[in-house]
Image (cartoon, helix red, strand yellow):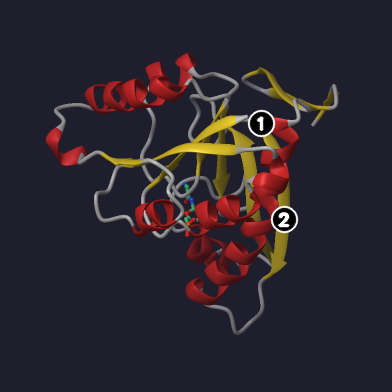
Amino acid sequence: MNGVVLISGNGSNLQSIIDKANSIDLTICCVISNKTDAFGLKRAAKVGIPYVALDETLFDSKLDFDQEIMKVIDNYQPGVIILAGYMRILSADFISKYFGKILNIHPSLLPKFPGLNTHQRAIDAFEKKHGASVHFVTEELDGGPVIAQEFVNIDSTDNAQTLAKKVLDKEHALYPKTIHWYTQGRLKLIDKNTATLDKKTL
Ligand code: GAR
């Protein structure tokens, strides 16, 4: 299956997907960033994947920017759109156009801690466990049906940085695994609240 990956920064999840692309039946046809200096663009360039960086400061509105991204995406007719550290809220038009085809990885055990600064918020809330979630993207921010999660323990010595590293390590295995379910056609978004794996509700 052809996939487009959207990033904003380091792209370590992108790297884990690049490394496993063959074994998860995925061809990454383009990497798109909303930050021109995202390190992930270098990762794409290094392995010859086409990439596009759009400077978000040059667009008047969220919709203008997303329309440009949609033009790029539609050149490739991808079967899946993979958000990998894409730190920009998508417009309603974008989400409805590709409904059921957009996956995201989020660094918390959703529905806990949607949004930003998840690691510090988990520590501040005295959580004992934290982790990462892969979910379908719907209009509700970090609110689409969860597909799979991995957890880590929060130790008394952890701070936001050590916790972020632990969670990222889990993400690098979790995301390719769930993308593979999708490329195999096993994973479906039925409606904004329901996803199935092998026809069983998750
Ligand atoms: C990852 O932890 C990912 O879960 C998170 O950003 C990081 C990106 O790291 N995504 C979000 O917070 C999305 N709301 P990476 O650029 O090294 O893959």
Is 126 left, or right, of 138 in this rendering? right
Out of 12 and 85, give the one closest to the viewer.
Answer: 12
The reply to whether discs 1 and 2 touch (Cβ–Cβ < 8 Å) is no
Helix, strand or loop at label 1? It is loop
Vertical side of 120 occupied by 60: above or below: above
Residue 30 location (% of width, % of height)? 43, 37
Q: Is residue 110 visible?
A: no
Q: Residue at x 66, y 48 (%)?
A: 176
Is 85 left, or right, of 41 in this rendering? right
Out of 49 and 83, give the one closest to the viewer.
Answer: 49
Q: Looking at this rendering, what residue extends furthest in the bottom direction?
A: 157
Residue 19 location (% of width, % of height)? 60, 56
Residue 87 location (% of width, % of height)? 38, 46
Q: Residue at x 67, y 45 (%)?
A: 22
Q: Residue at x 41, y 60 (%)?
A: 10
Residue 187 location (% of width, % of height)? 74, 28
Label 1 or label 2, whichever comes before in sequence order: 1
**How far, Cα to Cα, is label 1 from label 2?**
15 Å
Is 68 left, or right, of 121 in this rendering? left
Helix, strand or loop at label 2? It is strand
Residue 127 is drawn in which quadrant?
bottom right
Q: Amino acid at mark 1?
A: Pro
Residue 199 is drawn in which quadrant?
top right
Q: Residues within 10 Å of mark 2 (few under 14, many from 20)?
A: some
Q: Residue at x 31, y 26 (%)?
A: 66
Identify residue for label 2.
Answer: 150
Identify residue for label 1.
Answer: 145
Vertical side of 143 occupied by 117: above or below: below
